[in-house]
Amino acid sequence: MEKQQFLKFNQHIIKDKTILDLACHEGVSSRIIKNFGAKHIFGVEARPELVEIAKNKLQGNVEFFVGDIQDSNLIAPLVEKSQTVIALGVLYHLYNHFGFLSNILRPNIEHVLIETVAGPETLDTAMDWTVEDVKTNYNGWHPDKTRVLCGTPNLSWIFETAEIFDFKCDWVHSFGELPPKSRRYITHNEYIQIKENNWPDYETITSDADLPDRITNAINTRLVDDGPAQAGNKRILIRLYNTKNVDSKPVDLEQCYRWFEHRQKSL
């Protein structure tokens, strides 16, 4: 799914709103947000050369700032002036996730839209860690170091942290190209959920026996390999809402934490 698509789907939290676009890079997302009717946009990006590109692309109701999005001194005043916060493709490049969310999940904020990479997806809170080279534009940022520790929180971690600040999630969508799941690794629970009338038993499905094309195609369409090796290809969109001033219905974590389930629940 492209930025144009999922931002259009969330246009109701953009139109006539003041938007804080965090890690705006070259201003691609800011341009789309502007086209969808934002009242005003604050864009923040740590790398000055990228901010210069963004400024050359966009004028009018857009202001760009150079700085670390984990810097509360920079972010707090912008959050106070905003209604919606958008952070696309950045959560997994941070080292202080709780501090970051505590800065943006503020009482005046109505919605926060996050696009991130799937973490170690279980019902328990968890986070994967790696080290990134700061010199690469698409990696994490640190003002003094050349390498930085970056973490990828799972949905449970994000949900639990959001609730601390009276925010909940009312929309989750997964996307990304993943290979079909090997038949031998299909769990019995997965088999029960996808099987149709006249399918062979579970043992046959997970064996090397020949299957009709319709069954093979159904398995390849509905079940994907969501193992650790595919982590970078699993992307998730999360919309958080302020329970104190927005009327919405939260999603159930148990219904969306497994990749193949919320992959099927498309827009």
Image (cartoon, rainbow, N blue to C red):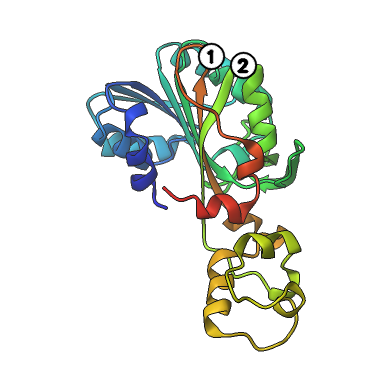
The residue under the point 43% across, 36% down is 24
Give residue 228's position: percent from left, percent from top: 72, 58
Q: Residue furthest front?
A: 198
**205 or 161: nearer the viewer:** 205
Compared to 19, does 227 lie above or below? below
Q: Residues within 10 Å of mark 2 (few under 14, many from 20)?
A: some
Q: Are marks 2 and 1 in contact (CB under 8 Å)?
A: yes
Q: Nearer the viewer, residue 204 or 159?
A: 204
Q: Amino acid at mark 1?
A: Arg
211 and 227: which is toward the camera: 211
Is residue 223 toward the left or the right of residue 63 in the image?
Answer: right
Q: Which residue is mark 1?
A: 106
- The structure residue drawn at horizontal position 35% and vertical position 42%, both measured from the top left corner, is 28
- Corner quadrant of residue 250: top right
Q: x and y percent of residue 215 in the render?
A: 57, 77
Q: Secondary structure at mark 2?
A: loop
Query: Vertical placement of 45 versus 218: above or below?
Result: above
- Residue denoted by label 2: 165
Label 1 Cα crowd, 10 Å radius (few <14 / some 14-19 / many 20+): some
Q: Amino acid at mark 2?
A: Phe
